[in-house]
Amino acid sequence: MKLFDLKDKYNKPIVLALGFFDCIHKGHSLLINTACNYALSHNDVESALFTFSNDPSVLIGKDKQIYCFDERVNALSGLGLQNVISTKFDLEFAELEPIEFLDLITENYNIKAIITGSDYTFGKKASGDVELLKSYCHNKHIKVITVPFEEVDGHKISTSSMKQLVTTGDLHTLNSLLTEPYFMIGEVIHARRVGTKLGFPTANIRISDDKLPLSNGVYATILQVGNTKYASMTNVGSKPTFDIESFSIEAFILDFDGDLYGQTVKLSFISYLRDIKKFSSSDELKNQLAYDEACVRHLTELN
């Protein structure tokens, strides 16, 4: 998959998916699949998607995004998409009138078709809509295809509802709506090595500050480094047994003996196990961790 900046120029004919891709859920996959299928059915046309390389939520005062840019690219790479076009959302971009945005993207890219949802808005104060897009594209002989909403229980899958699932820890529902289990990508960093003393050495993972935090808890996870995957159990939040109140993400990797410090890993969350609690002793915590490990082995065998 190739990555481009909005201001780059690319002459290869493309079909472009437009939308706000805070994460990659099943509604988004309809847009992406439509773009990919269009590309496959038209000779020499490539599929592409436009997104932001930073977090627009910070500028407009909303909650942080579910997936940072690198995570969205990772998710998109598994869906058959050929190109991602991105730009930084800043005050200059926010002031672009709808036609200015369309002029910019059509001048730099050879767009044959645009795929979007029926409620897509764009440009300054979201003043551009699908009708304006269709009128503009008609004059440039660009086909516009609108994709119907993906609904769950009669309701459209929305970014706000997805964010609520992250912050409340409803992993089961969250994963049912995403194109793959919810995940984080981050660097393994040095920590206090508390788990090592208990016989459960952990990888402490630093994630992007742009990412909306997952609800605190202990989870069954799969950690991927390179092309290798390991079952793991992950503590998201504090470690009250050791009076450590700071937030961290620590994964105990089953059947692994090695050094991951400095490496970038992908941590996929398979199932919620339990709340974080303060144990009366290290032995009580070790017994709980042994039980958690057995649960993780069972749960990750099913995935």
Image (cartoon, helix red, strand yellow):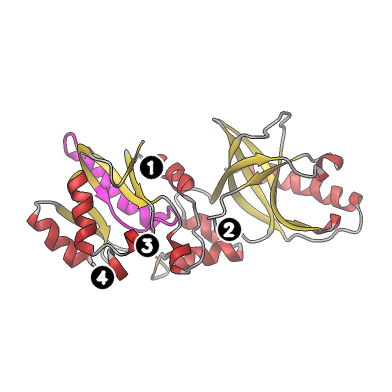
Q: Say which residue label 1 marks.
A: 79
Residue type at mark 4?
A: Ser
Q: Say which residue label 4 marks.
A: 127
Residue 10 percent coordinates (x, y): 23, 38
**Sequence-first disc among 3 and 2:** 3
Q: Which mark is residue 91?
A: 3
Q: Say which residue label 2 marks.
A: 171
**201 sits left or right of 143 in the view:** right
Q: CA distance from mark 1 to mark 4?
A: 31 Å
At x 13%, y 60%, the residue is: 136
SS of the residue at dot 4?
loop
Residue 134, quarter of picture: bottom left
At x 82%, y 51%, the residue is: 288
Residue type at mark 2?
A: Leu
Residue 12, quarter of picture: top left
Q: CA distance from mark 2 to mark 1?
A: 22 Å
Q: CA distance from mark 2 to mark 4?
A: 35 Å
SS of the residue at dot 2?
helix
Q: Nearer the viewer, mark 1 or mark 4?
A: 4
Q: Is residue 210 above or below residue 5?
A: below
Q: Nearer the viewer, mark 3 or mark 1?
A: 3
